[in-house]
Amino acid sequence: MSPSPTALLCLGLCLGRVPAQSGPLPKPSLQALPSSLVPLEKPVTLRCQGPPGVDLYRLEKLSSSSYQDQAVLFIPAMKTHLAGRYRCSYQNRSLWSLPSDQLELVATGVFAKPSLSAQPGPAVSSGGDVTLQCQTQEGFDQFALYKEGDPAPYKNSERWYRASFPIITVTAAHSGTYRCYSFSSGNPYLWSAPSDPLELLVTGTSVTPSLLPTEPPSSVAG
C-alpha cells in the first residue's frame, strides 16, 4: 500500500523540524579523584565527562603544550611540575565543545606544615566569636583553611607569616575539624603539608547554618 500524499507531506515537514546543532557543544565536567589536593608521590586521576557517544576527548594542562586525546589522565605519583590548571573538551563530528571549567591541581607537602590555633580557644559558646590563626615559618603570603566535610577552602592573603580567619557569632554548624595550608602567591599550586587538625567545639543549642569566615577573603591569585 502506497503512503498517502498527506503522510508524505507530514514526513517532509517533521524531518524539517529536526534541529541542527549550531554553535559549540555544551562543556564537559572535569574532576580530580580522590581530590584536587594531592600529596607529593600520591596518585590522582583526572576524569573528563561529556555526553554519551563522544568521538574524541582532549585534556590539557594550561600554560604548557601538554595535552592528551583521552578522557582520563592517571598520575601514579604527584610531582611539582604536574601541579597547575587543567581543562578538557570533546569533539563530536566536526564540532568542538566549550572547554570545561578549569581545575586547579595542587601539590601538597612541598613545604613544612604551618600551625593552626584558635583564639581565645578551641571551645566557644554559641553566639560568641573565635578567630582561627594559621602561622608559618616560611614567610608565605597565602593561606587556605579547610573545614572537614566542606568542598572548598577559605583563602586569605597576609604578609606577616600568618593569616587570621575570624568567625563572628558562631553556631553549632561551625563545630568540626579544621586544617590550614600555606603557600606563595608566586607558586599558587605548590602548598605546604596540612597543619595538625584543630577541633573546634561550639557549646550551646544553636543550629543556625552559617559560613566561615563571616566575610570570605579573596581567592588565590593564579
Image: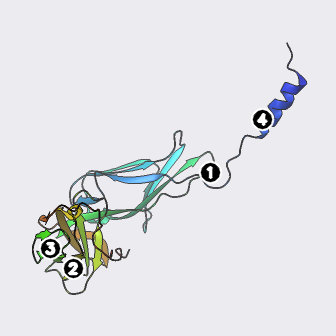
Q: Which residue is mark 2?
A: 164
User: In this rendering, which labeled residue sits more in front, label 3 or label 1?
Assistant: 3
Return the disc, 2 or 1, that comes first in the chain's sequence: 1
Asked if the residue at tag 4 contacts the one at tag 2, i.e. Cβ–Cβ closer than 8 Å, the answer is no
Q: Residues within 10 Å of mark 3 (few under 14, many from 20)?
A: many
Distance Cα–Cα, label 3 vs label 2: 13 Å
Identify which residue is drawn at 24% across, 54% down: 77
Asked if the residue at tag 1 contacts the one at tag 4, i.e. Cβ–Cβ closer than 8 Å, the answer is no
Q: Give the side of residue 67 with respect to residue 119, left or right.
A: right
Return the disc, 4 or 3, that comes first in the chain's sequence: 4
Q: Amino acid at mark 4?
A: Cys
Eyeballing the image, is 136 above or below 25? below
Q: Amino acid at mark 3?
A: Pro
Q: Which residue is mark 3?
A: 114
Residue that extends furthest to the top in the rendered view of this protein: 1
Q: Secondary structure at mark 1?
A: strand
Distance Cα–Cα, label 3 vs label 1: 48 Å
Q: Quadrant of the C terminus?
A: bottom left
Return the disc, 3 or 1, that comes first in the chain's sequence: 1
Identify which residue is drawn at 30% across, 67% down: 211
Q: Which residue is mark 1?
A: 95
User: In this rendering, which labeled residue sits more in front, label 4 or label 3?
Assistant: 4
User: In this rendering, which labeled residue sits more in front, label 2 or label 1?
Assistant: 2
x, y (%) of residue 180? 20, 69
Q: Residues within 10 Å of mark 2 (few under 14, many from 20)?
A: many
Distance Cα–Cα, label 2 vs label 1: 48 Å
